[in-house]
Structure formats: C-alpha cells, structure tokens
C-alpha cells in the first residue's frame, strides 16, 4: 500500500488492520446537504471502500455557505446534489466506489439499498425520514448515527440495534428536538461539530472498537459555549414498537409516503406523481412556449409567473414560491395538464 493513509494507520486504534476494515466497508449517507457532504468527504478521504448517497434536491446558491462539496459551477448547472457530490468525491479519491441516488428517501426506496451496508449516517433534515430509518435499521440490524444541527447548536447519538435506545425512546425521554426548519439559519461550524462526532463514531464501528463508542447523547451550542453529554441508556423501553421485545416497525407498516409535502423552511412544495420516471425531453417540448426553461440530464426547471418549477427525472416536482399545497397542485396541473 502507498502512503496515502499513513497518518491514519499510525493512529493506534486504527492501525493497518483497521484500515483494511475501512477499505472493505460500505457506508450509506442519507441526505447530501451540509451534514451529508461533510460526512461523505471525510469518509471518502479516509478510504471507505463504498459510499452510497441519497438526496432529492439540487444545488442552490444558498447552499454554498456550508455545503462544502459544492461549487458555483454546480449551482449554474442546477446539478442534483447526489450527482455533484459523486463527481467531486471521485476527484478526491478515485478508489472509492460512490453510488448516487437522486430520489426521495422512503421505506420503499431505502430498503433495497440497505444490503451490505455497515453503517448508516443520518444527514437528513426531517423526522419523517428519521422515523422510517429508525425502523429500517432495527429491522436490518445496522448501526445508525443520528445527527442534527440548527443555528449554532447540534446533537448526535449512535443508535445500536438490540443495545441502545432507539429514536422513539430517546424522543420520549428527552423532548429536545425543537427546531427542525432552517428558518433560524445556521453557521457552518455547527455542521462540522456534528460531523466530527458522526465520522468518529463511524470509524470506531468500522474498525470494531465498540468499547470506545460514546454511548451518550451529545449536545452543544458553539455560540453560547455549551457542551454536554447525556446518559440516555435508561430511556430504552421494553414495549417500544421499534426497539422493544415485540417490534411492529410502525413507520414501515402504514402509508407515510405522502404524495405532496411542504419542504421545511424552503417556501417549496414537493409533488410526487405515480410515475417512476418522467421524460424530461418531451416535457421540455411541451413547456418551451410557456417560459424560459433549463434542462440537464437530471432535471428541468421553468420560470412561470412568480413560481419556479423543477421537474425531476424520477417523477417528482418542486414548486418553489409557495407553502400552499393547493396552490402548488393548481400550478402543477396548469403546466402538465
Ligand atoms: Zn425504542
């Protein structure tokens, strides 16, 4: 082996055998925003063999302040985040196999890609997906590293199926998950702090140094100089529907797969059609008389009155400029009939 990973293998808890584990591991990162891109970059640099990325969004100007993988060129090209991330990650470390999925994370879309995954990293921004993940990782027995940040604050917790409390249990014990929208803003060090915890816990799991895992919920506020780790082991409930003795995995069993969704803090509504794939070329022909369009292999965007509408190849549509599902549906049907 060349000296690419020499500083990492010199670190005793990893060593050359740990590096071998890292090269043979597969990490799934759900979300390619601020947390997702920083986690992905660190793990790709560390030499993780396979990294799978999922994200439903594309790169926008307001992302560049903290989403470290993306460039102004990605904004101009309106590239989906998963695609842009994969391109940049391949330039950083060509030996890592990066798989990018431009899609919604749902129980249906996630379950088929959990095969062979060693660790799942939570880089989402909403609890709907987190509760689906909470069920899935328990069903498939995969460690999962929760992370969230807003303003100058953040928190992280490592969920180990059959050992630690799950997200349900944690929420019941510590109802501290208040702000989830990006309406109060965020500074990038809060992202980095969460990522530092997530990546370190991931490496401990991959090199099988379980005795070094934190086992505590960590919360911090960088601006107000607060750092706390909280023992939450006793929060685990034996009758929990996800991690208890008789799990029912409630978030996989009923339809939480809403067709329309207001995207938190974005003034945007997502509409998911029944289509598995929509032809962007024929949409382009249909819409070119209506307003200026931009087309790339992954999405088509059009300006229409005060709205911007983005059609994704996988059948989803974003209506930017409204928080009203009724308005969004009206615009959508006006355009596509
Ligand atoms: Zn539980």
Image: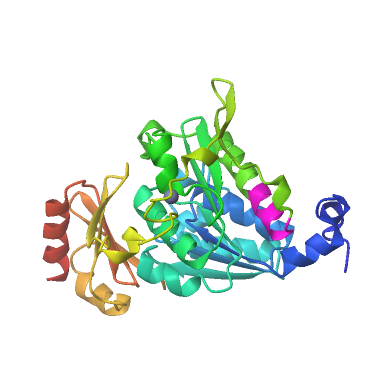
Residue 245 place in picture, x, y as percent: 43, 57
| Residue 181 included in the magenta stretch of the image | no
User: 16 or 164: nearer the eye?
Assistant: 164
Q: Which quadrant would residue 331 be assigned to in this image?
A: bottom left
Rendered residue at 54%/56% (across/down): 162
Q: Which residues are magenta?
A: 199-208
Q: Quadrant of the C terminus?
A: bottom left
Establish if 295 lies above or below 276.
above
Residue 75 place in picture, x, y as percent: 46, 54
User: 190 or 297: nearer the eye?
Assistant: 190
Q: Across the whole image, how many numbered discs are drawn on residues?
A: 0
| Residue 205 included in the magenta stretch of the image | yes
Let me know if residue 144 appears in the view: yes
User: 279 or 246: nearer the eye?
Assistant: 246
Q: As drawn, is 168 to the left or to the right of 209? A: left
Rendered residue at 71%/57% (across/down): 45
Q: Quadrant of the N terminus?
A: bottom right
Establish if 195 lies above or below 257.
above
Residue 289 place in picture, x, y as percent: 19, 69
Residue at the far top in the pictured view: 224
Q: Which quadrant would residue 336 be assigned to in this image?
A: bottom left
Rendered residue at 60%/38% (across/down): 193
Q: As drawn, is 79 to the left or to the right of 279? A: right
* Chief SS of the magenta region: helix
Residue 204 place in picture, x, y as percent: 70, 52
Q: How is the image coloured?
A: rainbow
Let me know if residue 294 appears in the view: no
Rendered residue at 88%/66% (across/down): 2
Q: As drawn, is 130 to the left or to the right of 308? A: right
């Amino acid at each position: 082996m060349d000296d690419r990973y020499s500083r990492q293998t010199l670190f005793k808890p990893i060593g050359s055998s740990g590096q071998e584990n890292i090269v043979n591991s597969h990490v799934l990162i759900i979300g390619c925003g601020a947390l997702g891109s920083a986690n992905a970059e660190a793990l790709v640099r560390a030499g993780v063999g396979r990294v799978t990325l999922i994200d439903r969004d594309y790169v926008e100007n307001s992302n560049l302040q903290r989403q470290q993988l993306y460039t102004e060129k990605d904004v101009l090209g309106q590239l989906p985040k998963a695609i842009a991330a994969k391109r940049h990650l391949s330039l950083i470390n060509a030996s890592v196999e990066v798989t990018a999925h431009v899609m919604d994370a749902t129980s249906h879309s996630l379950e088929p890609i959990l095969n062979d995954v060693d660790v799942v990293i939570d880089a989402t921004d909403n609890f709907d997906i987190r509760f689906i993940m909470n069920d899935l990782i328990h069903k498939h027995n995969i460690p999962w590293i929760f992370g969230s940040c807003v303003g100058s604050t953040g928190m992280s917790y490592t969920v180990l199926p059959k050992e630690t409390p799950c997200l349900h249990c944690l929420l019941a014990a510590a109802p501290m998950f208040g702000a989830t929208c990006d309406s109060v803003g965020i500074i990038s060090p809060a992202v980095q702090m969460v990522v530092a915890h997530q990546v370190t816990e991931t490496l401990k799991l991959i090199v099988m140094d379980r005795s070094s895992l934190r086992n505590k919920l960590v919360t911090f506020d960088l601006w107000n100089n607060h750092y706390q780790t909280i023992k939450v082991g006793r929060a685990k409930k034996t009758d929990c529907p996800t991690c208890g003795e008789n799990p029912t995995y409630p978030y996989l069993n009923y339809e939480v797969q809403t067709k329309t969704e207001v995207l938190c803090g974005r003034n945007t509504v997502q509409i998911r059609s029944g289509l598995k794939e929509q032809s962007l070329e024929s949409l382009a022909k249909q819409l070119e008389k209506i307003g200026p369009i931009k087309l790339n292999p992954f999405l088509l965007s059009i300006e229409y009155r005060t709205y911007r509408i983005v059609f994704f190849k996988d059948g989803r549509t974003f209506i930017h400029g409204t928080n009203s599902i009724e308005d969004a549906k009206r615009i959508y049907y006006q355009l596509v009939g």
